[in-house]
Amino acid sequence: MAFVTGFRRAIQKLTSLSVYQFSRRTTKRHVAGFILGTGIATFGTLTVAQMESSRRRKLNTSVYMAEPITDVDQLLTSEDDMKTKMELLILKIQADFCRALEAEEYAGQKFKVDRWLRNEGGGGITCVLQDGEVFEKAGVNISVVKGHLPPQAVQQMRSRGKKLTEGSKLPFFAAGVSAVIHPRNPMVPTIHFNYRYFEVIDTDGSKQWWFGGGTDLTPYYLDEKDAVSFHKTLKDACDESDLEYYPKFKKWCDEYFRITHRGECRGIGGIFFDDIDAPNQEKAFKFVSDCAHAVIPSYLPIVRRHKNDAYGERERQWQLLRRGRYVEFNLIYDRGTKFGLYTPGARYESILMSLPLTARWEYMHSPPPNSKEQKLIDILKNPKDWL
Amino acid sequence: MAFVTGFRRAIQKLTSLSVYQFSRRTTKRHVAGFILGTGIATFGTLTVAQMESSRRRKLNTSVYMAEPITDVDQLLTSEDDMKTKMELLILKIQADFCRALEAEEYAGQKFKVDRWLRNEGGGGITCVLQDGEVFEKAGVNISVVKGHLPPQAVQQMRSRGKKLTEGSKLPFFAAGVSAVIHPRNPMVPTIHFNYRYFEVIDTDGSKQWWFGGGTDLTPYYLDEKDAVSFHKTLKDACDESDLEYYPKFKKWCDEYFRITHRGECRGIGGIFFDDIDAPNQEKAFKFVSDCAHAVIPSYLPIVRRHKNDAYGERERQWQLLRRGRYVEFNLIYDRGTKFGLYTPGARYESILMSLPLTARWEYMHSPPPNSKEQKLIDILKNPKDWL
């Protein structure tokens, strides 16, 4: 048990260290730029030792898309707290993913960054790249929110099996990253992912926490090689923690992303999970971190394989119709969207950034039998195992 | 009281007569066509008296978009029943409206007609005109549905104040017409209307019934003259029944068609009401019938005024963004859509025909200050009295 605790602390150190290493590397670049810009006089005012110590004391936030939501001093004095670790993880995942997508654009299109704060506590960073050459609409959002759960929300959690005191307003903390990427070329699938951490403090002061998340792919045309490589990358990430995770969370994903009234799935799935609080907080965090780090390797190779594929009006129209289905799922069924929009004071622009730039609805549209469009529908109606 | 009952019966007769007169007029035309087509030999097999009697016995269903949902013999033997009267009303409203819209098209575009039946009882007629020159997507639907309300639906009705026995499965009947018209020209507003009748039989055999409905306008650019004429036509229809109806139902409409998360109304309103069961069934039916007959005079003059207005890419893009808001309202808030889609076995294509052909979502879009687009937003955020 002492070994496990020691091991856990070692992992904690490693995880927080990795953030520092990353920031140290890029700080150097930034300081160098600063030195080149202002000359030797500035350099002369700082000794190398002073720079080292200031680096150690300060979190280099310039690697993120914007300043963290939580005050940097507070993050630095609570580096072992899961709230801090999760905020630093999602800041990093957001920045890595946005930069990886920007690198695929040809004309240097960049994400527009909005950092926003909530009156009730916390805030978020919303990054949107709209009307790019490769990405028609790409949204990557993080939020770090604290406040008090109203009794109805507590009741809802109780109904999901959480042991919380009924009828009370309980303090909570939630941090998460979520993204939806709608590419322009219909041969490139849409990807969605979301990783989140939740804490509630009960009336007796005891804390409950859990993680949730998932990554899933929505192609417009089915490429079996893409489907296999996508699922394989997610499975490898899951297998690091538990061999039972991938099959369980793959199934959960197929069940969750279902457009019930049409009897079809939104896409070809991936993984989806919630209420992860085992085997312990560190391992659960490592699992979520592994999954979040698997997003780029699961998706970017597919983008590169297809972003220059030929397509015509037929493929574009089909893509727009499928985007209509995406809107149907998100606005009618998605728990996160609904919960978000029904929350007074919610930043609806960040919630609705998941919607495509353009979508289409045709009455009674049905693809020709045996067409490549019908091949996709067949898979969406009967999700299969890809591995 | 005897006078009131006598008067009510007289109105009942008048209402059912009007349907027969209408069908008799058009029957004549059809029989004439038949005679011309097949010649004297056919004429010789039918005496005038036989034709009169067959006309009296048969409802001329050829004036509708399709055969009624209820068996014609049953309709003819229950002509005083409100179920019959409502079915005949919505069949007529649907046909009148579809033909009025078709007459506005230049190249003879026609509605596609789907008559469908439900396994659980009843069915509907869905008429859609898609990709017309004047109407980009126009859907006009009727449904006549019977079955048993599950206990949860009964519970929901009880929470709305209906006195029904808890925990029972109760027989119900519902008939309604609904339409959403999305024109191509951004200077022509979208219209929506819906008129419906509902009956539930309680465990003791007692019947409860009520009407609901409304008509509302969603312009892309504000034309105050249109707004005033639209509201005036609806007010006149309401005033026939009760001078308090228009102000009450205008307010209800502004409150109902609200995109809460954006703090704006879907459009410039109209009228909306539910649970109308006073002063008596005949008068309530007459009120609903007056409102339904006011749709064409409220809308068609606006279509004619603007269908040839000049517009450019800016107006088209704004129209598509506003259509995105329309989708948000319909999929997130509209009770009818949600109730419909959550009902197992619902005909989702008929429910979703209300969605526009194309819609657009831009992150953080906001029209330039003092622009004509901003002028619309100002009204949507603060609905005003037009009369």
Image (spheres, coloured by chain):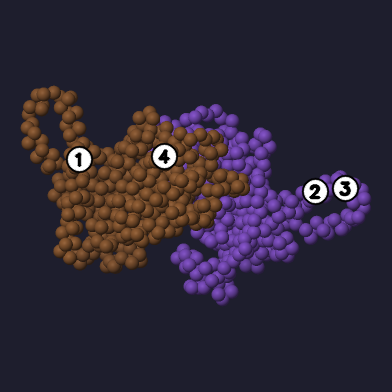
Chain colours: A brown, B purple
Q: Earlier in the sequence, mark 3 or mark 2?
A: 2
The type of residue carrying mark 4 is: Val
* Nearer mark to the viewer, of 3 and 2: 3
Quadrant holding the N terminus of chain A: bottom left
Mark 1 and mark 3, same subunit? no
Q: CA distance from mark 2 to mark 4?
A: 61 Å
In the image, residue A62 lies at what x, y percent?
22, 37
In the image, residue A36 lies at what x, y percent?
17, 25
The type of residue carrying mark 3 is: Thr
Which residue is nearer to you in this view: B232 or B85? B85
Residue that label 1 marks: A23
Q: Are marks 1 and 3 in contact (CB under 8 Å)?
A: no
**Vertical comparison of A225 with A7: above or below:** above
Q: Earlier in the sequence, mark 1 or mark 4?
A: 1
The type of residue carrying mark 2 is: His
Q: CA distance from mark 3 to mark 2?
A: 12 Å
Residue that label 2 marks: B30
Quadrant holding the C terminus of chain A: bottom left
The type of residue carrying mark 1 is: Ser
Q: Chain of mark 1?
A: A
Q: Which mark is residue A303?
A: 4
Which residue is nearer to you in this view: B269 or B137? B137
Q: Secondary structure at mark 2?
A: helix
Residue that label 3 marks: B38
Q: Secondary structure at mark 4?
A: helix
Q: Secondary structure at mark 3?
A: helix
Q: CA distance from mark 1 to mark 3?
A: 90 Å
Q: CA distance from mark 4 to mark 3?
A: 66 Å
* Nearer mark to the viewer, of 1 and 3: 1
